[in-house]
Image: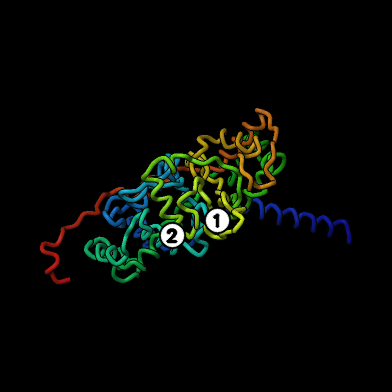
Amino acid sequence: MSMSIALKSLVGVCALFSATLYAALPPMSINTAKAELGKRLFFDTRLSGDDSISCSSCHIPSNGFSYPEPLSPAYTGSDGFRNAPTLINTAYKEVWFHDGRIGTNLNDVVRENITEDWLMNMDMRLMQERLKQDPIYVEMFKAANLGEPSNGGVRKALPEYLKTLTSKNVPFDKGELSDLASQGEKLFTGKAGCSQCHRGALFSDGKAHNTGVPENHEIFLDPMRHQSFLAYNMFMGVQDYLTLKRDVGAHVQTHKADGSDRGKFITPTLRELTQTAPYMHNGMLTTLEDVVEFYNQGGGEDSNKDSRLTTLSLTDYEKKALVAFLESLSGDALIGEEYEWLDYDFGYEYTEDWSNARN
């Protein structure tokens, strides 16, 4: 093999590795009419059973389409037991939710969130009838070539809207790293070992790992949250759900008899971190500095913790550099008319004596 051929081969291998580690987000093909319909649906509380919450109640645009508290809200009479993840770039995922329980498509993710009793608790047949009574939806569904308002149309329009929530003007993507962030990138792929799990376009391998994140005891001390937690684990077939004192995570998928899969959670994306605090599946880490220090200490305490997590012995400067690199993965806030339905035009005239009225 000649030197030039060998060099070209080496360059090709390096390019392939780089693409695997830091692949750019590919452009999305978006149906504008469907996305606009999905945007209105996202902010409409009538998609919940008692007209109390919308998708945007937990996924707030000004917070990077996440929630600014450790644990999310939930349907009336309950409360959430996990942190609400960002929806920015969610259309690029192949697995969803902290425990990875859905790995098919966004259509199924939408159905799960709308119909799950502790989330939005909506019977989609009732939702369909509500939408049919709104003249604006009648026109928007027609414009999107979805026929009359239907639950199937909702499950097509909302994913189309989610495709519009893509990172924008990210310093890392534009190659505009500060000197400190550049040092952090070297640590990220080297000494700190972050890229072992945080790789690819989303800086996530899409797999479940146990890093020893401490439990959020509010889940077990708050009756509203605990009842949601119990009901969910019972439904997911966790046999000892009544005595659980930890979130079992991806165990709801694998159900290993020895419990070695308990405490594993899907590697989260690192994009848009500056907008989406607090961090981890239960919001137990408040700042990026806390996250870096958590891993500097080798993660938390857990008998099933990933063996790759060890003490890093980072200097104060190296910690700052890592934080600077993580901050460089965030772009513009996706707020304003392009991303939000700003007109609250969800009211409509109620049908008098509706039980006797013709449909």
Instruction: Name the spot of residue 63 as percent of width and height, x first.
Output: 43, 42
For residue 311, what is the image quadrant? top right
Residue drawn at (65%, 44%) of the image: 194
Placement of the C terminus among the 4 image quadrants: bottom left
**Residue 140 falls left or right of residue 101:** left
Q: Which residue type does callout 1 highlight?
A: His
Mark 2 closeness class: few <14, some 14–19, many ≥20 residues within 10 Å: few
Q: Of all residues shown, which one is farthest toward the top?
A: 316
Residue at disc 1, secondary structure: helix
Q: Nearer the viewer, residue 212 or 335?
A: 212
Q: Measured from the top left, where is residue 135 in percent x and y? A: 22, 62
In this view, 216 is above or below 37: above
Residue 189 visible, this angle: yes
Q: Residue 228, image x and y in percent?
A: 39, 50
Question: 357 or 99: nearer the eye?
Answer: 99
Disc ID at residue 235 = 2
Residue type at numbered disc 2:
Phe
Q: Position of residue 110 (x, y in %)?
A: 41, 60
Marked residue nearer the N-terminal end (2 or 1): 2
Tell me where residue 26 sits by quadrant.
bottom right
Q: CA distance from mark 2 to mark 1?
A: 13 Å
Return the residue at label 1: 251
Residue at x 64%, y 33% (from the top left corner): 321
